[in-house]
Image: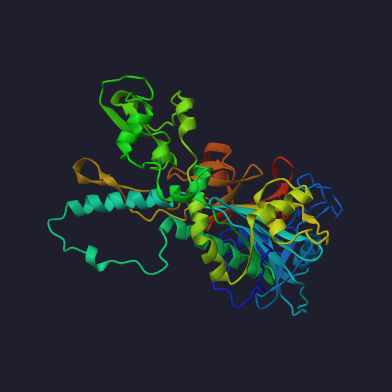
């Protein structure tokens, strides 16, 4: 089947630019002229645009800086050296730091090129790449949140506990209904994250075409490749209920200690708190003692890797793609392609499997022999929770007192703010009222478990997402700072 594309119709962006000038002491430094009291120490990539990059094996170009005109509309991006000169001359101001975006303070022409944005949609990670006729302008990947379902279940438990303490409450279940096109909150959040990412990229780049990879999965064939015909109507439990099926599968004995003639309990091989599902392939039988000893561990961690192998991979990601693949295309009114086409073109170019490389191929990079140069850096992002709005913890203390739930802000710092500690850029993962924070990198590497807030310098707010620009290599990504303002 040939790749299908549609011309992207651009209108007014529905999502405002989430990246506004960073608050706090860093604003003056970002907007100031370079000098004794302003920005200094600006660092860029090497001037050689033909620098070789290991992650693609092809020539690369230095990272481009998105530019906005006086009205806030995107222009073609420029080189970091030119952006620095505009800032030094007072002809531009900083709009966002990661990724670095500037806005011109004078009228200019608006000559633009065709830019295609390729999006590798996914359940956990979204890859994106915007290319022009000559090279890749921006590339990156965004890790989506996976805690929505857990937080909703926690909220439901709190509400049920609170309602059970009421004497009387009128029934409300008859007043509730689901609208057409309803999605589970966890899936809807991921769908909205895709849309928000694309709309924000449109606000900093004059994108003319968007192509998204969609896929349709046969979940039953993934579980049982030889399935056919009427077998699609017969599930794995045909002729059994869950308990009888497990008793036959594990020979009426505990899967961990082998005891027979004892009460057996149905147990999750991969606990639900660790992402396990209720599929029968993730269930086993266990005696009460083994079930209690296993606790929150997986079967492999409990010392039974053989049992772990019987648990098949969950199908959450495939279910997500089957549900939203058309919704995403219809909402954005954009073009689409298929996974097998992406794989064919990626293998043909000799690129490694990654979300960024897939997005580059989806956008049409090097497919028609145009030879676009790859970006020397990628923007790695991660969605985080903005704030826990619950004021108090659910459990009562002695005397009926309630303990405050979380610390919202200490001084000028909030959770997931980007800060500088000993010339190292990191993020606040743990906020404490004592003023000693837990600092980590975007990858979770610990910088310090209890660092005094007086030693930190605020760089930018999180606003639901933390981001870092990194140099792309074959096996890892090395963090870089294109514009290091002091």
User: What residue do we see at 72% from left, 52% from top?
Assistant: 344
Q: Is residue 301 above or below residue 47?
A: above
Q: Position of residue 242 (x, y in %)?
A: 32, 39
Taking the image as shown, residue 279 lies to the left or right of residue 106, namely left
User: What residue do we see at 59% from left, 43% from top?
Assistant: 443
State whether residue 384 appears in this view: no
State whether residue 430 appears in this view: yes
Q: Which residue sits furthest front?
A: 229
Taking the image as shown, residue 336 lies to the left or right of residue 90, namely left
Q: Position of residue 178 (x, y in %)?
A: 34, 66
Q: Position of residue 301 (x, y in %)?
A: 46, 27
User: What residue do we see at 13% from left, 59% from top?
Assistant: 168
Q: Nearer the viewer, residue 281 or 185?
A: 281
Residue 172 falls in which quadrant of the image? bottom left
Residue 115 falls in which quadrant of the image? bottom right
User: What residue do we see at 49% from left, 55% from top?
Assistant: 320
| Quadrant showing the N terminus | bottom right
Q: Is residue 416 above or below residue 201?
A: above
């Amino acid at each position: 089947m040939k790749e299908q594309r549609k011309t992207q119709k651009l209108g007014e962006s529905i999502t405002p630019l989430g990246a506004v000038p960073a608050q706090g002491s860093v604003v003056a430094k970002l907007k100031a002229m370079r000098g004794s009291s302003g920005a200094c120490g600006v660092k860029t990539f090497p001037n050689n645009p033909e620098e070789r990059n290991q992650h693609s094996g092809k020539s690369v170009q230095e990272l481009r800086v998105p530019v906005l005109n006086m009205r806030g509309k995107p222009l073609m991006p420029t080189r970091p050296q030119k952006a620095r000169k505009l800032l030094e001359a007072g002809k531009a101001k900083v709009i966002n730091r990661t990724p670095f975006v500037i806005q011109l303070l004078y009228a200019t022409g608006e000559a633009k090129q065709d830019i295609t944005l390729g999006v590798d949609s996914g359940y956990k990670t979204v890859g994106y790449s915007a290319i022009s006729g000559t090279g890749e302008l921006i590339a990156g990947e965004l890790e989506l949140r996976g805690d929505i379902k857990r937080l909703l279940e926690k909220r439901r438990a709190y509400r049920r506990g609170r309602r059970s303490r009421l004497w009387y409450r009128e029934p409300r279940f008859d007043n509730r209904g689901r609208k057409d096109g309803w999605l589970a909150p966890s899936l809807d959040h991921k769908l909205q994250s895709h849309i928000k990412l694309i709309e924000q990229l449109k606000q900093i780049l004059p994108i003319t075409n968007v192509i998204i990879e969609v896929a349709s999965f046969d979940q039953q064939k993934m579980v049982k490749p030889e399935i056919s015909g009427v077998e699609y109507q017969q599930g794995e439990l045909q002729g059994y209920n869950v308990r009888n099926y497990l008793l036959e599968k594990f020979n009426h004995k505990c899967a961990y200690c082998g005891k027979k003639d004892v009460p057996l309990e149905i147990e999750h091989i991969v606990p639900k708190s660790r992402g396990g599902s209720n599929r029968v392939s993730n269930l086993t039988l266990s005696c009460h003692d083994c079930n209690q000893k296993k606790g929150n561990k997986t079967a492999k961690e409990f010392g039974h890797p053989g049992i772990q192998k019987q648990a098949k991979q969950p199908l959450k990601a495939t279910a997500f793609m089957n549900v939203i693949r058309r919704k995403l295309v219809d909402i954005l009114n954009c073009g689409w392609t298929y996974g097998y086409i992406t794989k064919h073109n990626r293998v043909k170019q000799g690129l490694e499997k990654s979300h960024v490389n897939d997005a580059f191929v989806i956008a049409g990079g090097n497919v028609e022999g145009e030879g676009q140069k790859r970006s020397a850096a990628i923007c790695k992002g991660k969605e985080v929770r903005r704030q826990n709005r619950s004021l108090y913890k659910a459990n009562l203390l002695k005397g009926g007192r309630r303990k405050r739930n979380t610390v919202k802000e200490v001084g000028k710092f909030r959770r997931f703010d980007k800060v500088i500690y000993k010339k190292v850029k990191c993020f606040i993962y743990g906020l404490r009222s004592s003023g000693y924070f837990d600092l980590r990198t975007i990858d979770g590497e610990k910088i310090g478990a209890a660092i005094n807030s007086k030693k930190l310098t605020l760089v930018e707010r999180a606003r639901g997402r933390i981001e870092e620009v990194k140099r792309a290599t074959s096996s890892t990504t090395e963090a870089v700072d294109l514009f290091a303002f002091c």
